[in-house]
Amino acid sequence: MLILQAMINFSYYMTVDKMDEAFKAIKFIKSENAWEHMAHMCVKTRRLDVALVCLGNMGHACGVRALRKSMQSGDPLEVQVATLAIHLGLLDEAQALFTSCGRYDLVNRLLQTRNRWDEAFKIAEEHDRIHLRNTYYNYANYLESLNSTDAAIENYEKSGTHRFEVPRMLFDHPKMLEAYAKKTKDLGIQKWWAQYMESKGDVKAARLYYQYAKDYLSVVRLLCRSNNIDEAVEIANNSDDKASCYHLGQYFEAHGDVDMAVTFYTKAHACSHALRLAKENNMKDKIANLALMADGNELVEAAQYYENIPGQADKAVMLYHKAGMISRALDLAFRTEQFSALDLITNELDENSDPRILERAAEFFKNNQQYTKAVQLLAYSKKYVEAIDLCKQRNVPMDEGLAEALTPSKVI
């Protein structure tokens, strides 16, 4: 009766918010059941401060720690109360509290711990899709613990973790794992099985499964290791796989077949390697084309290479031009009288070009009796008087475009 009276007094003082009197009323209670009953009341009244006292007197250290952590983290009040409810075994109340504050992720997690998987999937699909795959993964773990292998595999696949989890689960059952690798269309699993077969020394099976997985690099690697080079070349050519081509380029370079090495480095878009070999072996007919496929530095280096070779100035000019070094290209074209290259380059000049380049190009065309071109370039460089004098001296025909270029107001 004393305990009952104390609890009645406790409830009354809590209701009128006289906390000191409430605690005085119950301080002599030693019954754990009584404290647990009061903790249950705290779930309904949401008095977490009182709940901490009740849990402490119950010796429920884990509950105290979890509740304090939730209170300190700034969780919504419903989440804090639900945390208390969970540690008191009031799971339905906890679920209702999580739902009331929209924490469907916690509802999902709670349902999983209760093995209510159908409800967990429903919540995940309707309200918590970000954790849907994680729910499938946890369900697969649960099924694996029950030795429901086929169902576990299905859910690992739905969770997107099957490439690691299925081989792990079936590792001690190689026949089942092989059957799964044969049945599945997943390239990651087939590649895993190929690697496993290779580690076991079964090269033939490894090649087959690498091919199923479309891992052409590994297929070519194994073929090169067994000296089946023709087949490796055929696969690299048919697949157009850059990694395979690069591997063959390395193979042919190591075996001294420079032409094939350059060919496959080029197919792999490893232009710097192809250029290096071409220069080392003086393959003048290939360097220009390779440089055009590469970046600026390779273009300039290739241009310098051709510049130092008699009779190859046209290629050097073209490469300097392609690299954006217009002044260098023009200078070389002037020195070597590359008229076709000069025409091509000067067609890209306009009033925004470097005046020194424009004047030099105009002088070159003037000295080579290409007066119309010279007048146009003088106009671009704003040398209007010289341009008009040249028109008079050489009877340069005046068309509308040239007349407009020679009009000073055009540039004011």
Image (spheres, grey):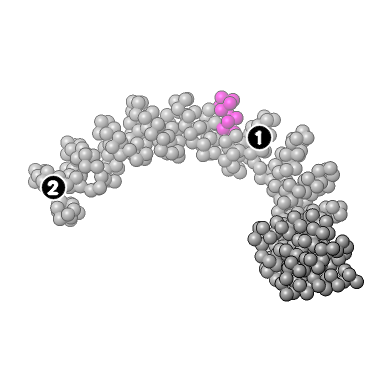
Residue sitting at x 57%, y 40%: 242
Q: Is residue 127 visible?
A: no
Residue at numbered disc 1: 221
Q: Amino acid at mark 1?
A: Arg
Q: CA distance from mark 1 to mark 2?
A: 68 Å
Q: Amino acid at mark 2?
A: Tyr
Q: Give left or right: position of 117 versus 234.
A: right
Where residue 211 appears, x then y in whole percent? Answer: 69, 43
Residue sitting at x 81%, y 43%: 171
Foreground pick, 410 / 141: 141
- 4 to 160, vertically: above or below: below
Q: Give left or right: position of 341 versus 281.
A: left
Residue sitting at x 25%, y 47%: 352
Where residue 256 appears, x then y in whole percent? Answer: 56, 24
Question: Magenta segment range?
Answer: 248-257
Foreground pick, 61 / 347: 61
- 100 to 333, vertically: above or below: below
Where residue 187 appears, x then y in whole percent? Answer: 69, 48
Packing grade of label 1 (10 A; few <14, some 14-19, many >=20) is some
Foreground pick, 279 / 325: 325
Where's the C terminus, which quadrant? bottom left
Where's the N terminus, which quadrant? bottom right
Residue at numbered disc 2: 384
Q: Is residue 250 visible?
A: yes
Q: How many marks?
A: 2
Dominant SS in magenta: helix
Quarter of the rendering containing residue 336: top left
